[in-house]
Amino acid sequence: MRVGVITFPGSLDERDAQRAVKLAGGTPVALWHGAHDLEGVEAIILPGGFSYGDYLRAGSIASHAPIMAEVIDAAHKGMPVLGICNGFQMLAEARLVPGAHGRNDCGTFVRRDQKLIVENNNTAWTKDFAQGEEIIIPLKNADGRFVADADTIKRIEDKGQVTFRYVGMNPNGSLDDIAGVSNEAGNVVGLMPHPEHAVEPGFGPDTAVAMRSGLDGLKFFTSVIQSTILSKA
Ligand SMILES: NC(=O)CC[C@H](N)C(=O)O
């Protein structure tokens, strides 16, 4: 399965996302922000980083990049799209997922191995997790505070669109401890922590943290490959 990873000016983590796709058994395809071509991919990842230097608002300028017209169209037609950190900020700015992002409540950049609970395993990117599974995924950002108006929070809580919640501590002041959300259909998921940094032992939150494998992030990528194969069966 071909999974596109889009590079924007200021992206940082596209190589790691491509590597995660490969480790999960997929074929990563490098896509360019300025193109109008998804090159026949069946899923898309918007990677982490500092697109356009986080000017205006993080993710805002990138959400208007040429390729985003194709991404928005494909997402509305059901293509799986994952936004990681800066990619999550882009999804929110493009209105593909609800909510917005503000500066972390501590006022500084935060980096930590973060415990999350999987609140909804019925999305294209979470099917390989158990409902309620606790996982550890690295977090690193400055503008990670998830915000939305009260009606939106109620709606996404009621409809199961809160995909991940922070456990143990809330690293940025996100409302309802929300770490990740999906669109209503469940094909588009955005989250602040970085699953592509937890796909192999020795390069993520492995044995030092509660003797875990450091592989919790891999299931995002195997999930989308599995769900795409199953949708064709
Ligand atoms: N790791 C990232 O993707 C950083 C996201 C964003 N630029 C922030 O600092 O909030």
Image: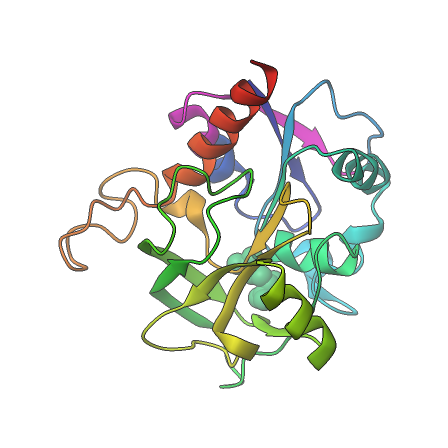
| Relative side of 91 to 173, left or right | right
Q: Is residue 129 above or below residue 102?
A: above
At horizontal 69% and vertical 81% (from top left) the residue drawn is 150
147 lies left or right of 213: right
Q: Is residue 174 visible?
A: no
x, y percentage for residue 211? 13, 53
- Where are the magenta residues, as a range? 19-33
Please tell me which residue lies in front, 147 or 14: 147
Residue 168 % position (x, y):
31, 75
Residue 219 sits in which quadrant?
top left
Residue under the image location 80 percent in, 57 percent down: 61
Q: Position of residue 108 (x, y in %)?
A: 50, 80
118, 12: nearer the viewer = 118
Quadrant placement of the N terminus: top right
Compared to 68, does 29 lie above or below? above
**Which corner quadrant of the image does residue 52 belong to?**
bottom right
Residue drawn at x 49%, y 77% as measured from the top left: 172
Q: Is residue 97 above or below residue 17?
A: below
* Residue with the most extreme top position: 233
Residue 30 or residue 214, whichever sits in front: 214
Point out residue 197 in the picture as x, y percentages from the top left corner.
39, 46
Quadrant field for ligand 1: bottom right
Q: Is residue 32 magenta?
A: yes
Residue drawn 55% across the image and 38% down it: 124
